[in-house]
Image: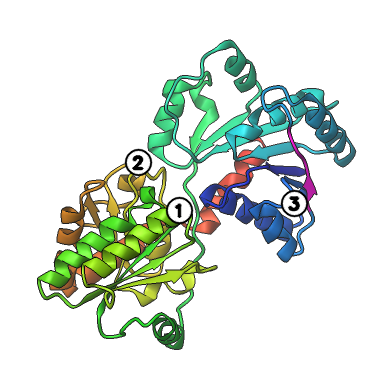
Amino acid sequence: MKLLELCLSQGFGGLELYAEKVVRYFHNRGLLSVTVVRKESLLDTRLTEADIPHIYSKVINQYFPLFAAWRLAKLCITKKITTIHIHSRKDFPLAVFTKLLCQHPVRLVYTRQMALTRSKNNIYHRFLYRYVDCYLTITKNLENEAKLYLPLTPNKIHVLYYGVPEKHQTEKVSCINYFSEHQLEEEVFTVALFGRIEYGKGQHLLVEAISTLVSEGKNIQGAIIGHVMDQTYFEELKATVANDGIKKSIRFCGFHSDPTTIMECFDVVVLASYAETFGLVLPEAMRAGTAVIGTNSGGVPEIIQDKVTGLLFKPGNAAELASCLRKLMDNSELRKQIAHQGKVFADKNFSEETHFAKLNKYLTGNC
């Protein structure tokens, strides 16, 4: 296989981080021929820091990117590329026209990570999807959407869950240092929420839930970890914390470059997003041996079996989230049991080793 990884997205989310992970994996094994990104994007920055070679492309006309496709096709011919792998819907037309302009057969594999909400059965999309060799979805829920909305035969659509690396035990000193740095108390029940700070990620729900539990006399604190994407929302969060008198119970810890190294420091990890296609933070926490709580929407119920591998609550319902936290605070044996069963389930279903073995199979032609 001679692989071309294409991701021109300028975002800072899971899609881009997954693309980076794939690039790193195949680069380290000598299977990656070309990586194409957008200049001054997150991928550009991170691949430069890792000293991984990559080139730039820019599309002027997203729907008919003929000039950009011609340039990529020339590169594919020179490098004898056998497979183009894409992640973003905006790169889809570019990949198709690149494939058409090549002088030799090239497979097109599309990893879809975002929800599908409407039919793609018009003439233009039927033309594009004709050239897809393999369409990978990150959940069964998304697989069902693809079969419902896309002009693809079912045999081309496959579920491939995200993979999480095996967790090596965090040194206790790392947790002590992290708690000290962010003024978290070691002996207090601690809940973490990892994610970009914006309304859709639901940090306000955790703040409200903790405020409720503090008012009941519960000894609990929360760590909100992630980039500030919406400054107005962030200021509103801080104002709520101040007004509710829970400044000592909520810490805004900023971005952490490798969350898996600190996940086992917490008693619970919460995913409070209103809609999450997958929710990678959950299997990461589960493989670290930490109990999880997530919203009952999107792909999350495929990760959390309620009251077995974690707890589920209704999206947007802070009272239900408070109830879930109360259960795990009041019953340490239940929390340990859920954490254990979650780890067993995640080790089996979301291992990085299994993920890349399957991805390699799909990229090389078994789809």
User: Mark 3, mark 2: which one is toward the viewer?
Assistant: 2
Q: CA distance from mark 2 to mark 1?
A: 23 Å
Does dot 2 land on a helix, a strand or a loop? loop
Residue kind at label 1, given as amino acid type: Asp
Q: Position of residue 54 (x, y in %)?
A: 78, 52
Instruction: Please indicate whether residue 212 sits to the left or right of residue 51 in the image.
Output: left
Q: In the displayed image of the protein, which residue is found farthest to the right?
A: 78
The residue identified by callout 1 is: 230
> Which numbered circle lies on residue 298?
2
Q: Is residue 58 magenta?
A: yes
Q: Nearer the viewer, residue 308 or 146?
A: 146
Instruction: Please indicate whether residue 24 sits to the left or right of residue 161 in the image.
Output: right
> Which numbered circle lies on residue 218?
none
Residue found 41% across the figure and 80% down from its top: 182
User: Mark 2, mark 1: which one is toward the viewer?
Assistant: 1
**In the image, which residues are magenta?**
54-59
Q: In the displayed image of the protein, which residue is found farthest to the left?
A: 216
Q: Magenta part mainly helix, strand or loop?
A: loop
Q: Quadrant of the N terminus?
A: top right
Q: Quadrant of the C terminus?
A: top right
Residue found 19% across the figure and 66% down from its top: 211
Q: Position of residue 274 (x, y in %)?
A: 32, 45
Does dot 3 land on a helix, a strand or a loop? loop
Q: Position of residue 7 (x, y in %)?
A: 66, 43
Residue found 74% across the figure and 44% down from its top: 3
